Amino acid sequence: MLIREYASHPNVMRKEDPTWKFALGASPVTEGSILRIVDEAGNEGFGYASATPHMGAIPATLEAELAYFKPHVLGRDGDHIEAIGAALDRAMRGAPQAKAAIDCALHELLAKRLGVPLCQLFGGKMRDSLPILRILAIKTPDEMASQARKLVDQGYRYLKIKVHGEVDLDVARVRAIRKMVGDDVHLTIDANQSYTTKNAIIAISRMADYNIDLVEQPVPADDFEGLALVTRTVPVKVEADEAAGSLSEIYQLVTKRAVDAVSLKIPKLGGLRNTIAAARLCEQAGVAYRMGAAVGSRLLSAHALHLACALPGVNYACELGEFARLLDDPFSGIEIENGELRLTQGAGSGVTWNGRPA
Ligand SMILES: [Mg+2]
């Protein structure tokens, strides 16, 4: 079935809390592009391209990349996902976020044409719902603790504490949050590369007193040896995120056992097929994995949800609920209930575009 339309739509979503901040930046909006492709029978597929500067993409580069890839998709048979992916890789090195949007849109188009839920293309569902972890932005310890309380009152049982490379203050953040939420809530840490190796070891060793499940990207993405040393030293599971920016980086991390876990994200890995490949690498190496933060439209979370529900090794909460703190989403169809997302039943990813011109 030939692809007859290919159009990208820049997307800006306001944050409910315009002061939302993490170690790598602060912005009152989340930006990306919505890619829409249509085949000759009128089936539609959508993909979300994430403009994430710390993963190498900004809105202008995304739009340019999506335009550059258009001739490699338009007029092709939409069933030939692997061949189109290979053509994109030949056409341009890198550009994982734009390639991810195309890969997601092609999978959704095929699922719609076949009349099956997206997860069926990945081997079918292993589970019907997924616990969701919500992220606490960097603020004072008291402010973060009160935000944690609000989320727990909404039904969440997994929280991630953003920290900033300031050992005493970060430990105070963890202490305040643990005190506020009690012992039954799972806590993780994300330093977004903000510690030196030595300070990471000091900080995480102290945070371990407050029962932390996992600490994400404690040291800079390029510091492979530092990450491996932290992993070997601290009594908490260490997860790579920014250091796991491509399949080849994940291959290096897991074969050398530099981390205990890997955060998989469809945009940084270039799509669903690469994310599945990354999961298989982790499985073979005995390294844990889960779906990391999908920040953007429900469209992005819906694709990640269908994949997470089909992957056998996902056994920890995934970060697919950040759409709940964003406004102006052009897609609807999934909502978090009691801290979980339920897999949708209909054909495709289960979300509907409300941005169609009148
Ligand atoms: Mg992270």
Image (tube, rainbow, N blue to C red):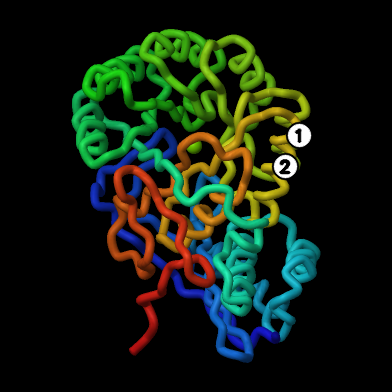
> Which residue is at 46% across, 37% downward?
317
Q: How many numbered circles does the render carry?
A: 2
**Residue 242 visible in the displayed image:** no
**Residue 275 visible in the displayed image:** yes
- Looking at the picture, tell me which residue is in the foreground, 124 or 356: 124
- Looking at the picture, tell me which residue is in the foreground, 65 or 247: 247
Q: CA distance from mark 2 to mark 1?
A: 6 Å
Q: Position of residue 330 (x, y in %)?
A: 36, 70
- Looking at the picture, tell me which residue is in the foreground, 26 or 163: 163
Q: Is residue 228 above or below residue 347?
A: above
Q: Which residue is mark 1?
A: 284
- Label 2 residue SS: helix
Which picture quadrant has residue 184?
Answer: top left
Q: Is residue 304 above or below residue 118?
A: above
Residue 331 shown left or right of residue 100 in the figure:
left
Disc assigned to residue 280: 2
Disc assigned to residue 83: none
Which picture quadrant has residue 41?
Answer: bottom right
Residue 166 shown left or right of residue 181 in the figure:
right
Q: Quadrant of the N terminus?
A: bottom right
Is the residue under label 1 in contact with that under label 2 (CB below 8 Å)?
yes
Residue type for callout 2? Arg
Q: Position of residue 113 (x, y in %)?
A: 61, 79
> Which residue is at 42% across, 41% downward?
131
Residue 234 shown left or right of residue 180 in the figure:
right
Residue type for callout 1? Gln
Residue 94 shown left or right of residue 170 in the figure:
right
